[in-house]
Image (tube, grey):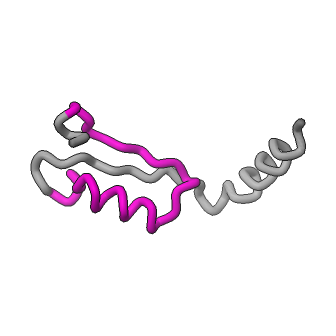
Amino acid sequence: MVRDEGVGLIELCGGFGSADVAAVTAAVGDAAGGVAGQVAVGHVVFGVDQVLAAAAYAAAASATP
């Protein structure tokens, strides 16, 4: 269905876990796996060197009314 609408890529943020990414990939197929006509699924995550900065940002954001 998403391919019929012209979607070629779905990017998921780091808030989605690996199981969520796998479920989306299974639901739409994965062009990266070499299946023609399917949709590529990406997962944007923080590198290990950014974990402390991300935690500080989350703490500051949750403290703001």
Specify the quadrant of the image occupied by residue 1.
Answer: top left
Residue, x 13% and y 56% (percent of image)?
A: 35
Q: Is residue 40 above or below residue 49?
A: above
Residue, x 59% and y 57% (percent of image)?
A: 47
- Is 18 within the magenta? yes
- Is 24 within the magenta? yes
Q: Residue furthest left?
A: 36
Q: Position of residue 20 (x, y in %)?
A: 45, 61
Q: Residue furthest top?
A: 6
Is 14 left or right of 49, judged from the image as shown? left
Residue, x 41% and y 44% (percent of image)?
A: 11
Residue stretch rendered in magenta on the structure:
5-34
Q: Residue furthest bottom?
A: 19
Is 62 left or right of 7, judged from the image as shown? right
Residue, x 70% and y 58% (percent of image)?
A: 51
Q: Position of residue 40 (x, y in %)?
A: 28, 48
Is 17 left or right of 49, judged from the image as shown? left
Count of picture labels: 0
Q: Position of residue 14 (x, y in %)?
A: 55, 53
Q: Is residue 27 above or below residue 38?
A: below
Position of the C terminus, as image quadrant, is: top right
Q: Is residue 60 above or below residue 46?
A: above
Q: Nearer the viewer, residue 52 or 40?
A: 40
Q: Position of residue 13 (x, y in %)?
A: 52, 48
